[in-house]
Amino acid sequence: MSTRAFIIEKTTNGTSRGIYCHHDGYISGVGRTLNKYYRDPFVVSALIALGGLSSLGQSLGSKVDFETYSGNEQCVAYHRDRGEDLVITNYMGGSQDDEEYTYMYDHSTQKWYIKKGSGRSKNWVLLDSIIEKDPFG
């Protein structure tokens, strides 16, 4: 069973777009990786441009064999690495596919935010503040 996540970027003009990430969506997985390796706005935009991910790595990387690559050094993307359609979703604030965690990079503040679940009623929380309290990661 995977911990699914949705990764969003909110641009300075208020539009939001995002991608699905299948593996390790919990805070000590995707959350810590985003917070540590994806702080630059241009890199965040390049991450979203990859489309849906099987797994988030420490770098965007380059094409790998989807079926055999098992490292965490780079992202594994459905479009680039498996040849599937490119999927980038305009985010409207509601449920995507029942992801367990939703992460948002706000280009205005250049910070990551998180909410558990994907419902509209959840409030965004600064990811830095959650990571500081997380004893497991």
Image: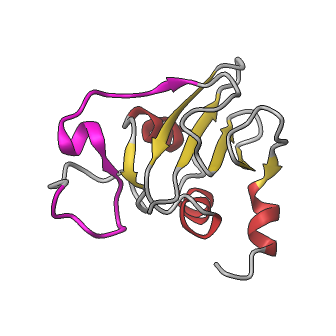
Q: Is residue 66 above or below residue 90?
A: below
Q: Position of residue 12 (x, y in %)?
A: 70, 24
Q: Is residue 93 above or below residue 75?
A: above
Q: Position of residue 121 (x, y in %)?
A: 83, 35
Residue visible at 35% across and 67% down? 73
- Taken as a whole, is the magenta stretch helix, strand or loop? loop
Q: Quadrant of the C terminus?
A: bottom right
Q: Is residue 44 above or below residue 49?
A: below
Q: Position of residue 111 (x, y in %)?
A: 72, 47
Pick the front one: 50 or 38 = 50
Looking at the image, what colour scheme do you see? secondary structure
**Per the image, is 49 magenta?**
no
Magenta residues (range): 67-90
Left or right: residue 30 compared with residue 127: left
Q: Quadrant of the N terminus?
A: bottom left
**Per the image, is 81 magenta?**
yes
Residue visible at 54% across and 60% down? 30
